[in-house]
Amino acid sequence: MKRWLKISLLLMPGLGLILIFIGSVVYIAIAQSFGYFNLSGESGFSLEYWAKMFDRLSYSRAIGYSLYIGVASAFLAVIFAYPLAIWLRRPFAGSLFISAVLKAPLLVHGLVVAFLYINIISYNGIVNQLLQALGIWDGPHRLQNDSGAVGVLILQTWKNMPFALLLLSGAVQAIGDDLLDAAADLGAGPFDRFRRVIAPLAVSATQAALVIVFVGALADFSFQVIAGPINKQSLSQLMVFFKGYGRWHDAAVIAVTLMGLGIAGSGVLALFSRFVLRGGRLS
Amino acid sequence: MKRFSLNKMLVWSLFGICVLWLVIPFTLAILWSFVDPSEPWTPDHLLPPVMSFARWEYLWEHSSLKVAMLNSYLLAPSAALLTLTLAMPTAYALGRLHFKGKEAVKLLVLLPLVVPGFVTAIFFTAILFQMGLHAWRFGAILFAHSILFLPYAIRIMSVSFEQVRQNHIDAARDLGATPFARWKVAYFPALKPGVMATLLIVFIYSIEEFAIAFIVGSPNFTTIPTLLFTNLGANFIRPNAAVISLILVVPNVVLMLFLERLLKSANPALSSGKG
């Protein structure tokens, strides 16, 4: 058998299926957003669905809101993970246990996390009772579905910080002691050592953490539905809403927007983090 | 000394945070799951006044929990086996053969991880509609899960295939081993941890997967996550949601810990029999 044929046959069940089905998903989403694959009428090229969507206030608000959740979650996860990764760089008594506990949220399903959270912040929940007992509040406050989406950001950070920690720990641990000792000998304090040694050497891991958390949080559905503000919709929520009413073309426009924002946002975040962590240089 | 006391302080503050973020939420969930329907747990009580297994029994007998568990626990092992089977040839090519474009193939297999879950779910449903397969929900979700989790299986198994030592294969061949015997003595010991890790990781991800099960399966086909989602929305009854949360999280935590142990043991030297 010819070598290329053998390799093609071997790649077919794995890569072939991925390309056919995920490729079809992407292709159908793009095609449906331009009027093709109409399930209930004439198919043909049309910009009508995009034009109508651009006129909708709910669409622009969903873009802004999803971007806010994506970017804020990515930065919060990395900001919390960085100091922990540096602290746990060198092993000490109990560091393995701490590391395991910090990574525990990775094992908990997102919906369970959301349940645990709304349990705590419920109207008569532990947070309300504690703040009343301390005399800070006179009566219980409604904390669930807050308009600033603080709940969603807390959930995203809780769920994603361990992942960012996992990526950053590997990068930070790979930095040799001799480099940091040399910087310290040259008079660099802890912040300078971070700014001039650790941050530039951990750029790739930081970029990976920012991008992965951003893409996941940008497309969030379940945290938003359970704990998010009721007067705002995320892009995924809007897409599911349109699909629920059989409006496939509108759902497709949202899907393409989501994928486009994911790619563009990832690029911007990767460039921005490289620029900042390398002290204002991109190369 | 300075570092030691700083660590001690940080450890204690982290302990406080862990209590706040892990112990309290899970303790509350466990307590809520034991609240007896005869006596509600009101804010003036520190602990539920009456505790029993009534909620667990009620959900088991009168909700779709049994069906959801059956669906989830049938779906997950089937998805694990199907994904492993589909991944093996590609993983073999990536792990054992050298060909042009190999790096591009490695990148392309990650495609399912790049497309947002709900986009995949919704437009996969569109494909099923076009193929007329939307009526067979179990098969549709099984197929979708297998494709979605192929990147993990291919990645793990290609690393395992790389760890198979060529001198073991050559030695077996020189001693007259048949292709099957060669597979048994040279390949299998090196692949075993990878196979187990793939089966476990796909099993866990399939049990936890929500978007596809929710979009493709709704309204008739329930899994544990879709049932939990329903119980967190319009049908929100806190003790019931607590029971389903614990059913979803506890087996997975145990399996994940087992997986971590397994991955730690997947040392190439050990698996290939060489120190």
Image (cartoon, coloured by chain):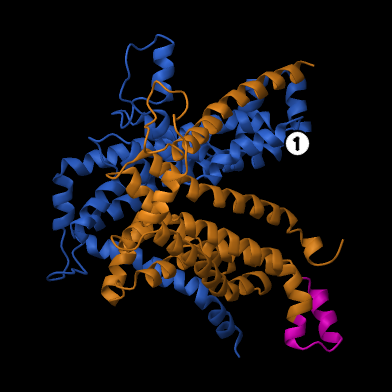
**In the image, residue A117 above or below residue A34:** above
Q: Estimate the x, y position of residue B203 in percent, counting from the top left.
A: 54, 61
Which chain can be seen in orange?
Answer: B
Screen quadrant of the N terminus of chain B: top right
The quadrant holding residue B195 is: bottom right
Q: Nearer the viewer, residue A83 or A97?
A: A97
Q: Is residue B168 magenta?
A: yes
Taking the spot 71% from the left edge, 40% from the top edge, the residue there is A174
Q: Estimate the x, y position of residue B126 in percent, counting from the top left.
A: 28, 67
Instruction: Check the residue under mark 1 and report the chain it is in.
Output: A
Q: Which residue is mark 1?
A: A176
**In the image, residue A46 above or below residue B89:** above
Q: Nearer the viewer, residue A160 or A199?
A: A160
Image colour assigned to chain A: blue
Residue B28 appears in view: yes
Q: Is residue B81 magenta?
A: no
Mainly helix, strand or loop, the magenta region?
Answer: helix
Specify the segment rendered in magenta.
B165-182
Residue A266 appears in view: no
Near mark 1 (Cα within 10 A), the count class, few <14, some 14-19 or many ≥20, is: few
Q: Is residue A228 left or right of residue B53?
A: left
